[in-house]
Every structure is written in C-alpha cells, then in structure tokens.
Amino acid sequence: QNEQSRRACPPRGPACICLRPSHTDRAARMSARLIAGVALVGLAVGVLSADQEAYARLKAFEAEFARFKKETALEMQHLEDESAQKEATLLERIERLEAPEHRRLDATQQAQINSNTDNWTANAAAIADLQSATNHTWLLLCGALVMFMQAGFAMVESGCCRAKNVQNILMKNLVDVCVGTMCWWA
C-alpha cells in the first residue's frame, strides 16, 4: 500500500494534491517561500523608488542652499557697503564739529543768549500769574458745583417726604449750605 500511495502522487512536488501531512506542509512552505520572494522583489522596487525620490529631494535642497548662500553673501556685501558709507559720513561730521571756528561764541550769539535770559524771567512771572488765576478760577467753579449739588439734594429730599415736612427739610439743607460755606472760607 505504501508503494501505491507513492506512485499515486508525484514525489515531493508542488503539484501534489493528496492530503498527506508531509506533502501538505511542504506545499504550504513552498507557497510561503514564493510569496516571500515576491514581497522581497516588491520591497526592493519600492526602496529603489524611495531612494530616487530622496535623491531628487536632496538635489533640490542642495540647489536651494546654494541659492540661499549666494543671496546671503550679496546681502552681507550690501550691508558692509552701507556701514562703510555711514562710517565715512560720521567721520566727516566729526571733523566738521571739531573744527575750531565752529566752537567759538561771537558777539551776536552772546547777545542772543542774554536776551533769552531776560525773556525767561519775564515769562516766569507771567506763568506764575497765570497759575494763580487758574487756581482761583478752579476753586470758584468747584464751589458753584457744590452749591448746585446742595440744591439738588434739597429737591430730592423734599420730593421723597410728605408735604408737611418739606419746609423743615429745606431749612436743614439751607443751614447745611451756610455752615459748609463758613467752614470752607475759615
């Protein structure tokens, strides 16, 4: 019987359709190897295309870096030129200021300084007078506002009580205004 079963299926081939465990395992192993080989080839092709993309990106970054380096060098040269120009302008200005003829006071400048001093004293007196007048005006304005405020309180209080008490409330508010005025002027 063993010989018949050996003859019935080809020995250890992938075309074996019998259900013997040894032949079934071998077929599964062979198909797994075939799938692994196909996957490996696919992976290699994917890695190759990814390498080509990475290489293209690298070249693009290198070109961008070269452009940036060139622009930076031009900008640095421009800044150095501006700095040199500003330095030359400042040195020229310093030389003009250090010249002896610009540092002397002449008679007209001295007279102008003296007239400014006289004007300053006159202006200081005028400013002091204006400040005093402004202070008095402000005090009078605030006093008038307080009097109007007292009248407003009298109206509110008389409107919130009975008619027989209105005369008493108004008298109390008038006495309050009189006492407040005397205390303020004292």
Image (cartoon, rainbow, N blue to C red):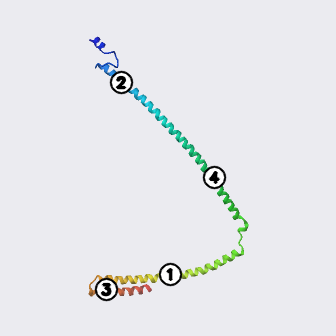
Percent across and percent down for residue 82 are: 63, 55
Q: Earlier in the sequence, mark 2 or mark 3?
A: 2
Are the residues tagged 2 and 4 within 8 Å (C-beta)? no
User: What residue type is disc 2 on?
Assistant: Ser
Q: CA distance from mark 4 to mark 1?
A: 58 Å
Location of mark 1 (residue): 134
Q: CA distance from mark 3 to mark 1?
A: 36 Å
Task: Judge depth for marks 3 and 1 and give the one in front.
Answer: 1
Q: Would you identify the image quadrant in which residue 93 lies?
A: bottom right
Q: Secondary structure at mark 3?
A: helix
- Residue drawn 45% across the image and 33% down it: 47
Q: Residues within 10 Å of mark 1 (few under 14, many from 20)?
A: few
Q: Is residue 116 above or below residue 74?
A: below
Location of mark 3 (residue): 169
Q: Earlier in the sequence, mark 3 or mark 4?
A: 4
Toward the viewer: 16 or 152?
Answer: 16
User: What residue type is disc 1 on?
Assistant: Thr
- Residue drawn 60% across the image and 81% down it: 122
Location of mark 2 (residue): 31
Going by the image, does 19 lie left or right of 69? left
Percent across and percent down for residue 132 are: 52, 82
Q: Secondary structure at mark 2?
A: helix
User: What residue type is disc 4 on?
Assistant: Glu
Are the residues tagged 3 and 1 within 8 Å (C-beta)? no
Q: Is residue 186 visible?
A: no
Toward the viewer: 131 or 78?
Answer: 78
- Residue drawn 63% across the image and 52% down it: 80
